[in-house]
Image (tube, rainbow, N blue to C red):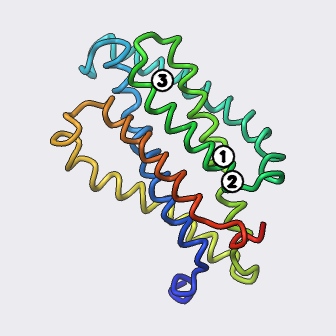
Amino acid sequence: MWDAIREMPKPMRKLGVMMLFQWYAMGIYWTYVTYSIARSVYNTSEPVSDGFRSAVLTNGTIGAFYNAVAFIAALVMMPLVRKIGPRYVHAVALVAGGLGMLAIPQMTEVSWLFPAAVGVGICWGSIMGTPYVMLASCIPPRRTGVYMGIFNMMIVIPMLLNAATFPFYYEPLLGGDARNALMLAGVLLVCAALAVLRVRDDELGT
């Protein structure tokens, strides 16, 4: 594994930067979206309040909705990946997710959350497959197993970094406001989109 890391293909290293932004952002989203909805829609930050319980139920509905969107989006993306290339498709999807996460904290009615969640669903549909399309095209076939394992570590490590670092600046920099946390996640997804565009088509063999 150490040799594989040392000899990691350059485009995979670039994808690693994208994965860092992408999964750090998703970690923030999953942790704080309920708290953000509680504040923006139900005007509460108290976890024992009726409003917060309503926010939990609302987030469950939103989660089901964006997963349904992700399913449809993934099917639509398949021909687009073949036609215009995976990095452009993934960049657009990441931007859609970023805009959705920036929008959710601004919504004050439950019904308004659904259009914002469309962007999150498009993003999630791409995250589940498109990065692996790019990875498969740039790694040597004889090392597919080890590089797939390392790539999956690029999911775990950002999530661990998120858990280890976010509490240190949540209060001082974000004011302890989950809405600000969600907007930060949106910005990080846009950064992930910029990172994936650093990968060139010729490096992916497309």
State whether residue 176 is above or below residue 27: above
Q: Nearer the viewer, mark 2 or mark 3?
A: 2
Mark-to-mark CA distance, 3 and 1: 21 Å
Give the residue at x 79% y 40%: 75
Q: Secondary structure at mark 3?
A: helix
- Estimate the x, y position of residue 86 in percent, counting from the top left: 71, 55
Secondary element at tag 1: helix
| Quarter-of-image position of residue 125 | top right
Residue 28 position (above or below residue 149): above
For the residue marked with disc 2, what is the amino acid? Answer: Thr
Q: Give the percent coordinates (x, y) of residue 63.
A: 55, 28
Q: Which residue is mark 2?
A: 130
The numbered dot on residue 63 is none
Q: CA distance from mark 2 to mark 1?
A: 5 Å
Name the side, left or right, on which 12 lies relative to 59: right
Mark nearest the camera among 3 and 1 is: 1
Q: Quadrant of residue 104?
A: top left
Circle 1 sits on which residue?
Answer: 126
Please report contact status of discs 2 and 3: CB closer than 8 Å, yes or no.
no
Dots 2, 1 in contact, CB < 8 A: yes
Residue where numbered disc 3 is placed = 59
Q: Quadrant of the C terminus?
A: bottom right
